[in-house]
Amino acid sequence: MPQQSNQPIRVLIADDHPVVRAGLSSMLGTQTELEIVGSAASGEEALAKLGQAKPDVLLLDLRMHGLSGVETLLAMKRAADETRVIILTSFETDEDIYRAVQAGAQGYLLKDTSLKEMVTAIRTVHAGKRYIPQDIAARLADRMMRTDLTPREIEILKLLSKGPTNKEIGHALGISENTVKNHVNSIIEKLEVSDRTEAATTAIQRGIISVDD
């Protein structure tokens, strides 16, 4: 529950880079309406500190060693933790944004956001509303309108990015070449692209698959 307006908003910062944690703590600590109640170097540490520090808002890095931001959000959801969360990240692929919001994030900001906007976001999210910048919100809306790819289609996309034929993919997955072809056609339709090469490229750009997959 939001605190009374005369009490500062309690903020916990979770980021695996010490310089980022220190910088955010120092910067946000200058604001009288905010109280920095701690910082965490990982998702696991953030989960442990939620019960101790009792923050109103968690600033959560998306990509950390160990539990990722999304995995931390999902763990909070399972624990019925009501701390409101703003994702603060250097990354903004469509899939990153979508997964974070689907997992329960109420805000999404890039790390180069101004102090003024960051404070506005914290205040807005603490008040029970969402804070997602207009350009990111537009991309999120576009992503939510697209039909989700199935786990099998994502599996095939990962293989597609390495350049094998349908026959080779079928052999690797233990399915027929014709079944692979049907999956590839479905992928192309869902991603609204013209061919398998563009499908793989688009999937990487949107963060659906990684170049390391």
Image (cartoon, rainbow, N blue to C red):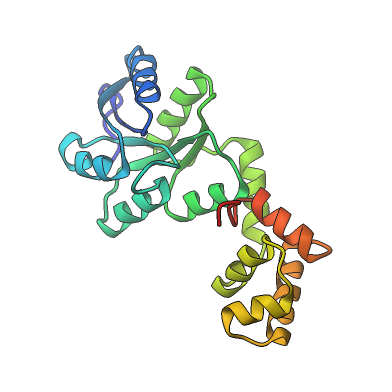
Front residue of this view, candidates 124 and 35: 35
Q: Tell me where residue 3 appears, x and y as whole percent.
A: 27, 32
Q: Is residue 184 above or below residue 58?
A: below
Q: Is residue 111 above or below residue 163?
A: above
Q: Is residue 45 above or below residue 115?
A: below
* Quadrant of res 146: bottom right
- The residue positioned 55% from the left and 47% from the top of the image is 97
Front residue of this view, candidates 192 and 140: 192
Q: Tell me where residue 87 appears, x and y as whole percent.
A: 45, 39
Q: Tell me where residue 57 appears, x and y as whole percent.
A: 33, 35
- The residue positioned 58% from the left and 84% from the top of the image is 174
Q: Is residue 138 left or right of residue 130?
A: right
Front residue of this view, candidates 27 and 44: 44
Q: Tell me where residue 126 appears, x and y as whole percent.
A: 37, 35
Q: Is residue 167 left or right of residue 33?
A: right
Residue ranking furthest to the top: 30
- The residue positioned 47% from the left and 30% from the top of the image is 121
* Quadrant of res 83: top left
Residue ranking furthest to the right: 194
